Image (cartoon, rainbow, N blue to C red):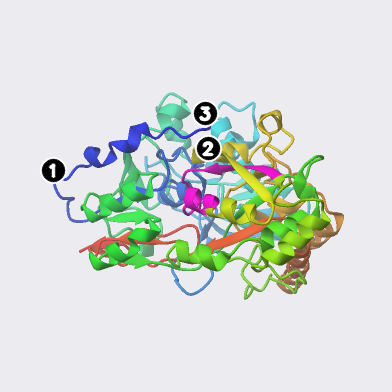
């Protein structure tokens, strides 16, 4: 199903109505943007919002993200692994030392056998525990893995397909489920989703599809500094911004993701906290680069980038965005020195389109797949309508194919020439993207080797020059060399206007004044463990 079905949540406010008793002390209720609860078997769906609330709350990776600072860019730190080292004589071989004394929520031990079992659920389609749903969520985030083996109870060896100095980042996206719990629920992932067991700081006590997930504190969490202060967290899917805003104002929830921009002043006047921070986020259009696509013409791609008044869009969003001039912000160490300056210049946009044979009387025709809400999608309907009007004024006629968020993420796992795309004449997708690391934000989306399902190059872009820059990033283990190659790659991407870059989200969320201790990290993921309720 691709057109959103919203009837079920029109009654959301009634479901959590004003007559409901006040939440107990120590309980945090969160209104998410997702239309449903995330898959909670270990590899969440619902994009990175799923990882934020249904991933790193309940599970850990071998590497975790440091989410403790609001001012420093987040980076990976040891999680279930205490170290990872590459063999100098064979740089495709990595030795992973595992953390001792860690238990799953069901009390069973985390060890090398559990690591190999979890690898089998993702990489071995002949294993009993293989789960296509989890594979769909994580395979494109860990494409380097070739093989794995147990060395001893505390050590595993991973082997990569290619030399990859960025491999430790991939370790953060594979989360570890309990083999014993899977056995206990009848070797059935659907049943495991109702009674999951990970190693994370929270345990799951209730799962109700399309309604809620309830989490409680894991007092036995292995990292004593991150044992949660909260007694309980309740996660509620609320895909409409107005519904979330009304729920917060009426006291039915304590925290909402992405409040409606026009309600921010009202929320502040009601005493709510509005929290913003820059983070590695990009919102734009990823165009089709297959034969027949209008986006194959560089002049069209540049014109689209010049046709958009991002300052006006920022005003529309109540200041909750940064203006995008590429995949990363201009002050980012990977930005480089592109010659093409992404700015508002409709006259130049019209000139380029005229040179390409288009005008407002004979416009470029393009259909973009968009969502109604979702992880990192900001305010997609209002933003896309704004872009549609702006591009129309210079000679680009957009229309939209509207999907529910999880359905749009499934579209992004296809390629632009898939029958489902060509039948609907879709020539671009609007899926928010992260640049937490060079693979996730660059190679996965722009390198010709990373077509779906292995990666995220939906448009089938192929640029040998860009591929060469990105290959240098992977093959080096020197951070300075990696950064220099990243700058060259980003310069090439912007000069070729490979995307229509629009905005970097400021990650707005609104909270009751009762919510204490939250630190908004410069990350898609956030840490709920220091949070308490006053």
**The residue stretch that appears in magenta:** 365-385
Closer to the camera, 490 or 471? 490
Which disc, if any, is residue 533?
A: none
Residue 361 image offset from top left, x and y in percent: 71, 48
Question: Disc 2 and disc 1: Cα gap in Å?
Answer: 34 Å
Residue 355 image offset from top left, x and y in percent: 83, 57
Q: Give the structural element (helix, strand or loop) at label 3.
A: loop
Q: Residue at x 57, y 65 (%)?
A: 310
Q: Is residue 73 left or right of residue 475?
A: left
Residue beneath disc 1: 19
Q: Closer to us: mark 2 or mark 1?
A: 2
Instruction: Using the rendered view, name the quadrant where residue 504 is placed.
Output: bottom right
Residue beneath disc 2: 403
Badge 2 crowding class, 10 Å Cα cut-off, few under 14, some 14 to 19, many 20 or more, is many
Looking at the image, is mark 2 or mark 1 earlier in the sequence? 1
Closer to the camera, 242 or 79? 242
């Amino acid at each position: 199903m691709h057109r959103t079905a919203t009837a079920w949540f029109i009654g959301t406010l009634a479901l959590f109505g004003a007559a409901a008793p006040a939440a107990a002390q120590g309980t945090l209720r969160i209104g998410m943007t997702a239309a449903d609860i995330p898959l909670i078997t270990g590899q969440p769906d619902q994009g990175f919002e799923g990882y934020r609330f249904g991933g790193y709350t309940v599970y850990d990776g071998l590497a975790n993200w440091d989410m403790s600072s609001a001012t420093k860019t987040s980076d990976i730190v040891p999680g279930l692994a205490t170290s990872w080292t590459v063999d100098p004589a064979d740089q495709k071989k990595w030795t992973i030392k595992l953390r001792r004394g860690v238990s799953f929520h069901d009390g069973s031990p985390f060890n090398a056998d559990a690591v190999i079992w979890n690898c089998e659920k993702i990489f071995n389609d002949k294993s009993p525990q293989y789960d296509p749903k989890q594979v769909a969520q994580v395979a494109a985030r860990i494409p380097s893995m070739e093989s794995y083996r147990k060395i001893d109870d505390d050590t595993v060896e991973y082997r990569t397909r290619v030399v990859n100095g960025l491999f430790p980042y991939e370790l953060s996206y594979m989360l570890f489920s309990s083999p014993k719990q899977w056995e206990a629920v009848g070797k059935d992932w659907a049943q495991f989703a109702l009674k999951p067991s990970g190693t994370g700081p929270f345990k799951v006590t209730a799962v109700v599809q399309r309604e809620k997930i309830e989490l409680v504190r894991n007092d036995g969490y292995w990292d004593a500094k991150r044992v949660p202060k909260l007694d309980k967290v309740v996660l509620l899917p609320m895909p409409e911004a107005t519904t979330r805003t009304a729920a917060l104002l009426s006291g039915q929830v304590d925290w909402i993701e992405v409040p409606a921009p026009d309600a921010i002043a009202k929320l502040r006047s009601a005493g709510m906290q509005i929290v913003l921070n820059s983070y590695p986020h990009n919102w734009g259009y990823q165009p089709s680069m297959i034969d027949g696509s209008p986006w194959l013409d560089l002049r069209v791609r540049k014109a689209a980038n010049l046709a958009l008044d991002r300052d006006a869009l920022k005003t529309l969003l109540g200041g909750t965005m940064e203006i995008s001039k590429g995949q990363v912000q201009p002050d980012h160490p990977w930005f480089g020195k592109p010659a093409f300056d992404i700015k508002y210049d409709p006259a130049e946009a019209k000139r380029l389109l005229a040179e390409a044979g288009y005008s407002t009387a004979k416009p470029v025709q393009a259909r973009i797949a968009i969502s109604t809400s979702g992880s990192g999608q900001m305010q997609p309907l209002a933003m896309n309508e704004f872009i549609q009007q702006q591009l129309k004024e210079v000679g680009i006629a957009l229309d939209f194919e509207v999907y529910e968020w999880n359905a749009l993420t499934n579209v992004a796992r296809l390629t632009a020439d898939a029958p489902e795309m060509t039948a609907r004449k879709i020539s671009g997708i609007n899926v928010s993207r992260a640049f937490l690391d060079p693979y996730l934000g660059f190679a996965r989306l722009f390198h010709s080797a990373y077509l779906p399902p292995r990666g995220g190059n939906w448009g089938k872009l192929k640029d040998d020059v860009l591929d060469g820059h990105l290959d240098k990033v992977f093959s080096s283990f020197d951070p300075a060399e990696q950064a220099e190659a990243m700058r060259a790659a980003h310069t090439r991407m912007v000069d070729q206007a490979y995307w229509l870059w629009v905005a970097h989200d400021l990650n707005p969320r609104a909270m009751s004044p009762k919510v204490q201790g939250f630190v908004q990290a410069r990350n898609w993921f956030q840490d709920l463990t220091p949070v308490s309720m006053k």
